[in-house]
């Protein structure tokens, strides 16, 4: 039962990380769509804005990469816990706040979780 609770917690964390990733990608897109004016670069203020803009883009891209790595790591942990929880084939496991309301587990003919994705949304 502890594994199932841990799995639900991981799914909640994954959901939050995916929301943060979407927000960070939106921030990056907005930055790229609205660069500062390159006119009048002879003034110190405009050069500083251009430098701040470059740092903001780099920071946003770094955060995006970190979030993608965290999502991958938590997905792997959830997959492992799902295997440990020994959810029977075809059984739906309710997950609050997930993209879909449950996870359905699929097995191959030997009883192993399939290689093309141990978790599929149903």
Image: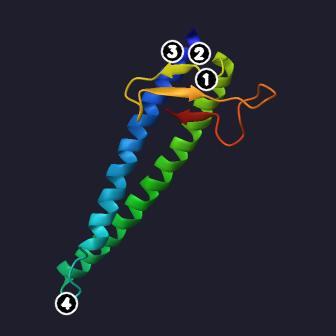
Q: Earlier in the sequence, mark 2 or mark 1?
A: 2
The residue wearing badge 3 is: 5
Q: CA distance from mark 4 to mark 1?
A: 62 Å
Dot 2 and dot 3 residues touching (CB under 8 Å): yes
| Disc marking residue 3 | 2
Dot 2 and dot 1 residues touching (CB under 8 Å): no
- Count of picture labels: 4
Crowding near pointer 3: few (<14 within 10 Å), some, many (20+)? few
Q: CA distance from mark 2 to mark 3?
A: 5 Å
Marks 3, 4: nearer the viewer? 3
The residue wearing badge 1 is: 90
Q: Earlier in the sequence, mark 3 or mark 4?
A: 3
- Observer-nearest of 122 and 76: 122
Residue at 36% x, 43% y: name it: 19
Residue 35 is situated, as x and y percent measured from the top left of the image, at 25, 76
The residue wearing badge 4 is: 39
């Amino acid at each position: 039962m502890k594994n199932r609770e841990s799995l639900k917690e991981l799914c909640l964390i994954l959901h939050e990380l995916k929301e943060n990733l979407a927000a960070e990608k939106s921030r990056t897109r907005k930055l790229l769509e609205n660069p500062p004016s390159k006119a009048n670069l002879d003034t110190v203020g405009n050069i500083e804005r251009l430098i701040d803009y470059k740092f903001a883009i780099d920071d946003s891209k770094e955060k995006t990469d970190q979030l993608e790595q965290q999502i991958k790591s938590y997905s792997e942990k959830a997959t492992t816990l799902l295997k440990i929880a020994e959810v029977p084939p075809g059984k739906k496991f309710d997950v609050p706040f997930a993209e879909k309301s449950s996870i359905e587990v699929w097995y191959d003919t030997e009883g192993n979780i399939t290689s093309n994705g141990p978790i599929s949304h149903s």
